[in-house]
């Protein structure tokens, strides 16, 4: 009995047990992750992205890579714990740094993978949409979106492993502010029109079929939507921005 | 043995091909290829859209060819090999058809050159067909949809009662619409739908002048009203007949399409 206890309390044996347990748990978590990702429809979502295609050409897949990484993470923890228990490396400082650093690297790698896939997917979807509306020449937009997503991904990943990212963050802020300013300026008229459009749709001061005059244009209302009002006279069809409808006022014509 | 079927055809028309089937033609650049279907799933260069999935093969090919003619993909007198499916999803049949410009029905005109958006007309047609199939609580119903040029149509009609769609923003194609219209279809009068698909009004009594409207004798007041309003305005009318259950579409005062809902 005593010998049993002695054997069990031997650090090498405990370390071995921890190692074995770690490998089993790691394998199971990997399998579970794979099934979960499959069930969540990840393979369909990442289909067609360059990352997935690269993975396919290497004889693996995105789901398998992510599952593999989660397994490795647990293997790593098991190995480190075993080393610690077996007291092969007896430096507490080293141990502390490693335990802090490993999960961060793991998350950073995960963020990178997700970021790459999201960036590819964004490029793919936006490109497809532009092709769908017969505007395939604007290849800049999907590219810009892709690299924006990648940039943010790298920022998050670098911040995760503790690299100073302040300068990059400032750059991102400037970039985002630029987009907001340009966007607000470009879409100013749309914003005003849509605000008026919401009022017109909710209140319906005039509706389809009414005879109205807006400014010097008069006719029968054919359509009211968020941005424009379509008015048709005998020979002409006016498409009037809702902004102007409000600015000029509405005259309802009664015979 | 069947070589005569394919001998010197001017073009090959594939009806809703799968992408692998379509890919087989990549290696034969000398064949002029047209893809016909409800959607361009294979990303083909020359594509002709079918407004609805015709179950009847003759109809499908006829309307497909009319679309090809309309899009100037083929010319009068061309001979086409049409590959389509009769029994299940895959392509299993080839038929040799000569394009004849004389027996056009104008269905393509109805969908592509009307005021209203193509998708709106498509949705209304599907709605009428579904209504015809199921009826209201098992009983056959009739319905009259006037699509497009809503402003003018509103001025050429008057309300029979309060408009249930007043101050609402319901568009055909919204999921709730099928149920709503089924309920409202027991009301008398016409549904008026705008170019972009907004349901402007129900319960409308149409007051067009019926002069010069040429529709077959035996159709009732609903068809007459529908036909006449399309002559007076730029709208089209889709009518579900209560007595024989057929769906008919009118444009410019003439019948351009007649389909039996039971066949879909």
Image (cartoon, rainbow, N blue to C red):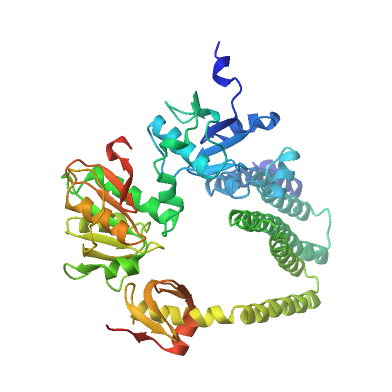
Q: What residue is at 59 percent from the left and 78 percent from the top?
A: A187
Question: In the image, residue A183 lies at what x, y percent?
Answer: 64, 77
Question: Which residue is the extreme one toward the front?
Answer: B212
Any part of residue B164 in sight: no
Q: What residue is at 20 percent from the left and 53 percent from the top?
A: B222
Answer above or below: position of A200 versus A15.
Answer: below
Q: What residue is at 31 percent from the left and 70 percent from the top?
A: B168
Answer above or below: position of B229 versus B111.
Answer: below
**Residue B135 falls left or right of residue B195:** left
The answer to which of A160 and B128 lies nearer the viewer is B128
Q: What residue is at 59 percent from the left and 31 percent from the top?
A: B11
Question: Which residue is the extreme one toward the top?
Answer: B1
The answer to which of A5 and B204 lies nearer the viewer is B204
**Residue A30 falls left or right of residue B75:** right
Question: In the image, residue A105 lies at what x, y percent?
Answer: 75, 60
Give the position of the C terminus of chain B as an image quadrant: top left
Answer above or below: position of A189 versus B243.
Answer: below
The answer to which of A61 and A31 lies nearer the viewer is A61
């Amino acid at each position: 009995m005593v010998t049993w206890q002695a054997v069990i309390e031997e650090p090498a044996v405990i370390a071995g047990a921890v190692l074995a347990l770690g490998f089993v748990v790691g394998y199971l978590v990997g399998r579970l992750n794979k099934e979960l990702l499959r069930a969540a429809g990840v393979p369909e979502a990442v289909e067609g992205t360059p990352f997935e295609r690269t993975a396919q050409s290497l004889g693996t897949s995105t789901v398998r890579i992510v599952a593999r990484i989660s397994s490795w993470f647990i293997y790593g923890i098991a190995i480190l714990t075993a080393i610690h228990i077996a007291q092969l490396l007896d430096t507490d400082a080293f141990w502390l740094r490693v335990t802090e650093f490993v999960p961060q690297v793991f998350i950073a790698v995960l963020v990178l993978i997700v970021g790459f896939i999201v960036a590819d997917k964004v490029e793919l979807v936006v490109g497809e949409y532009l092709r769908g509306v017969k505007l395939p020449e604007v290849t800049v937009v999907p590219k810009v979106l892709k690299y924006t997503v990648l940039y943010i991904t790298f920022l998050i990943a670098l911040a995760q492993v503790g690299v100073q990212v302040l300068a990059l963050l400032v750059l991102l802020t400037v970039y985002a502010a630029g987009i907001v300013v340009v966007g607000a300026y470009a879409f100013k008229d749309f914003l005003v029109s849509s605000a008026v459009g919401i009022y017109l749709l909710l209140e319906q001061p005039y509706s389809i079929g009414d005879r109205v005059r807006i400014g010097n244009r008069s006719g029968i209302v054919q359509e009211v939507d968020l941005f424009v009002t379509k008015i048709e006279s005998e020979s002409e069809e006016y498409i009037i921005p809702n902004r102007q409808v409000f600015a000029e006022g509405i005259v309802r014509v009664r015979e | 043995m069947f070589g005569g079927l394919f001998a010197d055809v001017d073009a090959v028309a594939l009806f809703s091909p799968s992408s692998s089937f379509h890919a087989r033609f990549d290696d034969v650049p000398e064949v002029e290829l047209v893809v016909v279907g409800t959607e361009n799933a294979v990303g083909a260069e020359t594509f002709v859209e079918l407004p609805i999935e015709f179950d009847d093969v003759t109809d499908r090919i006829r309307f497909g060819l009319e679309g090809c003619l309309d899009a100037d993909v083929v010319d009068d007198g061309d001979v086409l090999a049409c590959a389509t499916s009769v029994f299940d999803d895959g392509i299993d049949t080839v038929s040799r058809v000569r394009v004849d410009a004389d027996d056009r029905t104008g269905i393509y005109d109805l969908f592509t050159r009307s005021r209203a958006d193509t998708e709106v007309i498509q949705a209304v047609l599907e709605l009428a067909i579904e209504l015809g199939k199921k009826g209201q609580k098992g009983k056959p119903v009739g319905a009259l949809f006037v699509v497009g040029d809503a402003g003018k149509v509103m001025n050429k009609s008057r309300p029979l009662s309060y408009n249930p769609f007043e101050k609402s923003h319901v568009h055909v194609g919204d999921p709730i619409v099928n149920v709503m219209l089924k309920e409202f279809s027991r009301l008398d009068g016409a549904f008026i739908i705008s170019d972009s698909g907004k349901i402007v009004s129900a319960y409308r009594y149409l007051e067009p002048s019926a002069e010069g409207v040429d529709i077959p004798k035996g159709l009732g007041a609903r068809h007459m009203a529908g036909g006449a309003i399309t002559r007076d305005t730029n709208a089209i009318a889709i009518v579900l007949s209560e007595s024989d259950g057929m769906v008919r579409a009118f444009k410019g005062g003439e019948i351009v399409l007649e389909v039996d809902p039971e066949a879909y």
